[in-house]
Amino acid sequence: MDKAIFLPVAALVALTFGVAVLLLRARFRAGFRRQVTLGDFRYGESERVPPEARLPSRNYVNLLEMPLLFYVACVVLYALGAVDAAGLALAWAYVACRALHSLIHLTYNNVLHRLAAFAASNVVLLVIWIRLVLAVLK
């Protein structure tokens, strides 16, 4: 069962790469439409970058922030041999929350719905870490 922890990890990695593709597509589209120039990305994103290109960029950054703690927890759980059914279910719940957050963010972008998915993912991640610390203390 221990290796199974890498399936939700792989799913979150796939989501991150998927959003990266959307980001590149949005930026190239804005470039081809002459809405932006290369200089608009020299120091991040300038005010000229249209919202449809900013949104996937922000979501991509979101997928590189808190999920880092998820990746670390999964690797440590695996290394400790502490992966169990509950931990695996929590890992999948985290990925589902992050996928829901991205779906909301990249489609209709209701801030309250997005916040709920984000908050839920953070609660799940906190539980994963509490369980991890308890496993280390055993």
Image (cartoon, rainbow, N blue to C red):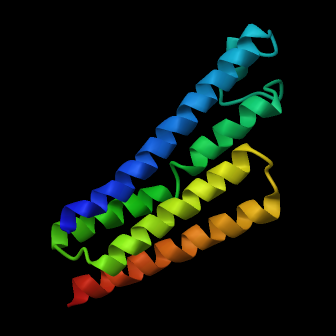
* Residue drawn where x is 64% and y is 57% of the image: 101
* Residue drawn where x is 72% and y is 13% of the image: 31
The x and y percentages for residue 3 are 20, 61
* Residue drawn where x is 71% and y is 29% of the image: 45
Between 25 and 80, the residue placed more toward the observer is 25
Between 102 and 30, the residue placed more toward the observer is 102
Residue 76 in the image: above or below residue 50: below
Residue 84 in the image: above or below residue 117: below
* Residue drawn where x is 25% and y is 84% of the image: 135
> How many dots with numbers?
0
Q: Can residue 42 be seen in this view?
A: no
Residue 7 in the image: above or below residue 82: above
Where residue 81 sits, quadrant-wise, is bottom left
Where residue 132 sits, quadrant-wise, is bottom left
The x and y percentages for residue 92 are 43, 65
Residue 69 in the image: above or below residue 51: below
